[in-house]
Amino acid sequence: MKSNLRANELKFHINCCGGLTELTVGFSRASPHMSEEVNPDYDPQQALVYNNFPKKVAKRSTAYRFQMALKALKDESFTDKLFKKYYDISANELLSQ
């Protein structure tokens, strides 16, 4: 973003859609890389959201391995460093503003 030819026209919208959130990605439920299993933590009394759903990504699936790879990058602070490299500010700095 900082090196985009139109960088002076681009803006952060920190409070858009509820503000900064953890990165989430999606796989089609019909994808050969996705398989599901029963989610024992599902609570039907609560709203359906990404972490309260009757099924969850099966550990044997590529989608789960991808999720774990993204988590490892986050845990190693790689994603924050990448964010800082491309946006010239860290996500933590943005959250503290």
Image: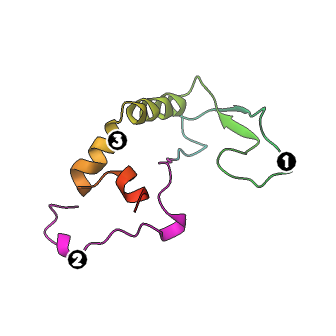
The kind of residue on which mark 3 rests is Thr
Q: Earlier in the sequence, mark 3 or mark 2?
A: 2
Q: Give the overall secondary structure of the magenta segment.
A: loop
| Contact flag, marks 1 and 2 (Cβ < 8 Å) | no
- In the rendered image, residue 22 lying in the magenta stretch gets the answer yes
Give the label, 1 or 2, closer to the camera.
2
Residue span colored magenta = 1-25
Q: Pointer 3: what residue? A: 79
Front-most of 40 and 83? Answer: 83
Point out the image quarter for the C terminus: bottom left
Q: Is 45 drawn above or below residue 58 in the view shown?
A: below
Q: Is residue 95 left or right of residue 36?
A: left
The kind of residue on which mark 1 rests is Pro
Give the label, 3 or 1, closer to the camera.
3
The residue most toward the top is 60
Q: Is residue 12 left or right of residue 35?
A: left
Q: Pointer 2: what residue? A: 9
Mark 1 element type: loop
| Mark 3 → mark 1, Cα distance in angstroms | 34 Å
Count the numbered circles shown. Answer: 3
Task: Find residue 28 and report its horizontal and vertical position in percent.
Answer: 56, 46
Numbered circle sitting on residue 20? none
Q: Pointer 1: what residue? A: 44
Tell me if mark 2 has few (under 14), some (14-19) or many (20+) residues whose alpha carbon lies within 10 angstroms of its own. Answer: few
The kind of residue on which mark 2 rests is Glu
User: Which residue lies at the image location 30% right of the left edge and 49% below the top edge?
Assistant: 83
- In the rendered image, residue 34 lying in the magenta stretch gets the answer no
Point out the image quarter for the N terminus: bottom left
